[in-house]
Image: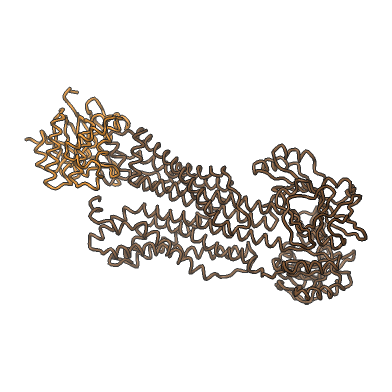
Amino acid sequence: MSFAFRLMFRDIRSGDLLTLLLALVISVSTVTSIGLFVDRLQLSFEKESANLLAADRLIRSDDVISPEWEQKAKELSLQTAQRTSFTTMMFADNSLQLSQLSAVTDSYPLRGAYLIDDKLFGTGRRSVETPKQGEVWISSRLASLLNVKLGDQVEVGDQPLTVTQFLVRDPGSSASAFAISPRAVMNMADLAATNVIIPGSRVRYSLLLAGDRASLDEYEDWITPQLNESQRWRTPTQRGERIGDTIGRAESFLLLAGTLAVVMSGVAMALASSRFVKRHLMQVAILKTLGATPKQLGRLFFLQLFLLFVAGAAIGLGIGWGIQEIIASLLSGLMSTALPEPSIGRLWLGVATGFISMVAFCLPLMSHLIKISPLSVLQPNAKIEFNSFAIYAIGFVGMFGLMCLYTNGFLLPSIMTVAILGIALLVGAIGWLAFKLGRSLTSGATSGWQIGLASLYRRLVPNLFQLLVFTLIIMLTLILTGVRSNLIADWQQQLPEDAPNHYLFNVQANQIDPINAQTSKLGVKASAWYPMVRGRVTEVNNESVQSLYPEERNEPELYERELNLTWSDTLGEGNELVEGDFSAPGLSVEQEAAKEANLSLGDELTINIGGNLVTLPITSIRTVDWGSMQPNFYLILPKSALEDYPANFVSSMFISDREAQSFYRAMAQYPTVSILNVGDILRQIQAIIGQLSKAIQLVLFCILSAGALVLLASVRSTLQERLEEGALLRVLGARAALVRQALLVEFGALGFFAGLIAAIGAETCLFGLQVFVFNTEASFHPLLWLLGPAIGVLVITTIGVFASRTVLKVPPMLLLRGL
Amino acid sequence: MDRNTAIKVSNLTHTVTSNTGDLTILKGINMEIKESESVAIVGSSGSGKSTLLGLLAGLDVNTSGDIFLYDQEFSNQSEEERALARGQYVGFVFQSFHLLPSLQAIENVMLPAELKGDKEARKKAEVLLDKVGLSHRLTHYPNQLSGGEQQRVAIARAFASNPKVLFADEPTGNLDEENGKLIIKLLFDLNQSQGTTLVMVTHDNELAKMCDRQLVMSAGQLTEKAL
């Protein structure tokens, strides 16, 4: 044991074990910092999204929620709250108004807070309290409609309640942001006395839960099998919600990126191990001649590896923790909320990474080291016989295992493995051709170009490997640069500052002019007014929807619900004609909806409008920019088909915070008009996307660091060879400048090719992403073709020349003595 | 085996497999070396001298025939057993010194004793380095020593385990004449004072002549050179 220690410290002193230790430390700290930071971000996203749910998890039901469910949650130490939402008439002295009322228990909200105000149309202050028994908080809009002020009484069914606050925002309201009735919140304890909920009432019951993730997961496993069709388990990151989707995508990306960092670090470890083994071959052979037995050596190296693991893991965890703290504090100014503390439990990921890396990347090589014949001392050129396949196989299994651990599944690692293998083959082929071409174009050793390009071909395998690693990293960087502009531009750039943030519904034709007059007085510009008539598609080419989609299976969205229909002579803002003639007397269908329902020009739809059936052919197909925040419609009919039906009008407009109060006051004159404020939701989405983009940049930085380590380790693994060559060249009279030029050419060419192939790959991927994922038009990215090779040349040359700087510094004599 | 016999070889044949087929390097060698004897194995390059030395020291396993080193029969032993036997009986000096570059001079010399778990390793190493005239270079690393100094450290290391047999492979091959002479003197002095058997492969006729016997290796056969 003590001998193993002594030998290890001597090895560390010599720098060999230090390289391995460094690789291990970087591997563990990279994974730890990414793991912890991703965890914090996830917790933060969940927390932000939880504000929208007012809980971490929620069960939504059309039936009363069984008390057992709440009991079970309490057994798991989860916090609970209940909310019962329904639409009811609210009465004040002389007026009555249909309102959206929520009755909540005292513990509501579990996450997030109310915004309430003492003043009508105030901007609000935070409150985590809930209305007390006998109280009600009502929105300013509802208060205007009912003509009540603070302290007045309103009645809900049989129960009088006192208005004590004006409600600006209910934390759970965004989840049903498109509810257009005026809102109010009361205490659950008053609900029974109202007697408004009778059998058959349309009521939405919610059980809200909050607590630690493990208990929530356990609860989810318990509850899921018991949910019926009218009950839903909702999580903040649930699919189908816009914000949920964004977070989901970001989470996958971060995990994917983290996995790449793991792979990179693993490769760096394998390279460091391989160098360690090469440098220790003779040492082992000598120790054997001195009487060290294979068992003794086995114990010795195993112990060394174990000590190395303990030291590497401990240092790595410490550094990893530190790095993520630094990153978090750097980003704290940019985050809209403070990042939650990371879970200590996530540290195991770093430990597991260290352990698996040692087992997969060091142990197999080390075990071969022990097998070297002592006869090698008499045959200086003796090489170790590796079973390369087994070593690669173990390394691959280890790497795959790490990826599975990291992403908590097989799918992503499998896709990544296939993708990386595909890219590897492609890069291998292109690289081989390029290096061979470079070699054939130059012969001799009179210029740095010749020596550098020859080196590329001579160290073909390590160079192809480096080419692959850097192609992957640069490609990822370029794709992200492209995707980022798509992702963010969608929301932050395409959506101008004055994008509409309020919708006005239920406007009668005779109200349009006075409202326009009011808004223009406020300096607010409304978008066009669209008439809206409700209707449902019942037949397609004279065949009923029911017979086409029995039991409503896979019904396209166009048929599954009542649609808002409109007529218009001109294509609205954000609409673009794809096929047909918009002015023809037929239907204009939105492209995606038409695609989903398999409709094309000429197909006939029968629409039930207020009991009358209207049959029209499709005469045009158009795209709609749903993000434009303008009123948009799946179906636009000719004016003649709709003008006889009573219509409501809809419009959207941008109301700044400054104008909001005057606008709400002005609109209070039109009690039947519904106003929907989507500004808060937009702001929240923008904040989250802002955070994501920061996180993505950060993870990218981690991957680049891991990639740099791979290059360092890789150059170090060929360092001895380079030193010998450099020494020989210099002994033969080459100036240091020539050797330096050769290095620059070798790494520069490597970087250029990596950047070029990466640009090709990134452009291809972006094309696919734009067309198939973001549904935008494909565009060419000339910047990538400049950035790729530039990043490649700059980064690889800098690191490469830095790593091999000793080639230029060490006196040739010293090297030749060691040859 | 005779009580005074250190090494006995009978019908030793060694064949290696290469790309061009099987190659028989040693062809039916018989020899005996007495305790405390010094023997030089000479011959042209590629004649099989080093292969024979490696087999005698138990570094490799012969194809057929018997090799005895004292009571150890290498032909039938596992790598583990041969390593133990080497630790117990054998010391080595190599042409290219083979010091561990990561260890200081003193640490290199301590190695054999440390492998045996000897607590006195450091003290013994200091004495030996003093004997080879390097007491002022204890904490130097190999790359800070000249070739002659490195070989002196190697000699000290070879004697550190009190070997019964010292195998030397071209010990002066990488040294200039002056250093070569110094090394030879050291080697023979220590050999005599410790009563070690010396088996040496060399191209150097002067050095070979200093040995008690000279064996000539030629085309895989070994013959005794008349003195």
Q: Extreme right residue here?
A: A94
**Residue at the (33%, 39%) spot, across then down:** A7
| The image quarter in which residue A145 lies | bottom right
Q: Is residue A366 above or below residue B65?
A: below
Q: Is residue B44 left or right of residue A114?
A: left
Looking at the image, residue A511 sits to the left or right of residue A444; the answer is right
Q: Colour of chain A?
A: brown
Q: Quadrant of residue A378?
A: top left
On screen, residue A714 versus residue A657, left or right, reads left
| Percent x, y of residue A193 | 89, 46
Q: Position of residue A753 (x, y in %)?
A: 43, 64
| The colour assigned to chain B within the rendered structure | orange
- The extreme top residue here reads B3
Q: Residue A83 versus residue A142: which sits nearer the camera?
A: A142
Which color mode does the image show? by chain
Tell me if residue B3 comes above or below residue B129 in the rendering: above
The answer to whether residue A229 is visible is: no
The picture places residue B38, in percent across and down from the top left corner, at: 13, 33
Horizontal and vertical percent position of residue A307: 41, 39
